[in-house]
Image: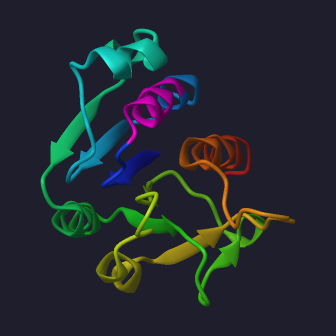
């Protein structure tokens, strides 16, 4: 599994992504756009050295990164609330996926959604917020991906 972070601002979220990637032994993290990347003191504070053990790559443009991965026969799954999204338990997890996680303000880029193989959502019974923190969602996706592969 690869997690692609589409313009995520928070350094603390990025540190948490590194810890999540380490916990699930992801192939790598792909950090895009204005997503901060190591070395960075605030990322390290949350990652607690996971940024040194997890492979990562930086791309300026998220859409170009997704196109490159798609050309490598990776299955692109955007994690997003969308009219075309499937519930997490309806996704057929395999071994060659890239999960695209959103920017906290603008969500996943529409161009990326258009070329995604699938769009995944985690249903919520919200009272106030429509979504969870992005790295919490990554933990749920990572657990499902690890334990429910076909």
Give the residue drawn at x 57%, y 24%. 23
Q: Is residue 62 left or right of residue 83?
A: left
Height in image: 41 above or below 96?
above
Give whichever of 33, 54 is nearer the camera: 33
User: Relative to residue 148, is residue 72 depicted above or below?
Assistant: below
Residue 128 relative to residue 95: left or right: right
Q: Residue 133: image x %, image y %?
A: 61, 48
**Horizontal side, residue 64 vs residue 83: left or right:** left
Residue shown at 35% from the left, 20% from the top: 42
Question: Is residue 13 one of those drawn in magenta?
Answer: yes
Q: Position of residue 78 (x, y in %)?
A: 48, 68
Write the residue at 37% across / 86% down: 114
Q: Taking 29 as reference, is 100 above or below it?
A: below
The rendered magenta stretch, by its main secondary structure, is classed as helix
Indicate how the structure is coloured in the image.
rainbow
How many labels, in total? 0
Magenta run includes residue 51: no
Against 35, is 115 above or below?
below
Q: Residue 26 in the image: state x and y as whole percent.
A: 46, 35
> Magenta part of the protein: which range?
10-19
Residue 132 x %, y %: 67, 53
- On the rendered structure, is 119 left or right of 143? left
């Amino acid at each position: 599994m690869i997690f692609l972070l589409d313009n995520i601002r928070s350094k603390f979220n990025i540190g948490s992504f590194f810890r999540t990637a380490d916990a699930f032994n992801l192939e790598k993290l792909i950090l895009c756009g204005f997503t901060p990347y190591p070395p960075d003191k605030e990322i390290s504070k949350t990652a607690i050295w996971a940024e040194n053990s997890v492979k990562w790559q930086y791309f300026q443009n998220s859409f170009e990164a997704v196109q490159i991965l798609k050309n490598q026969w990776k299955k692109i799954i955007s994690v997003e609330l969308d009219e075309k999204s499937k519930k997490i338990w309806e996704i057929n997890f395999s071994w060659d996926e890239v999960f695209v996680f959103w920017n906290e303000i603008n969500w996943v880029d529409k161009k990326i959604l258009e070329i995604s193989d699938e769009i995944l959502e985690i249903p919520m019974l919200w009272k106030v917020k429509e979504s969870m923190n992005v790295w919490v969602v990554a933990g749920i996706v990572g657990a499902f991906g690890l334990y429910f592969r076909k």
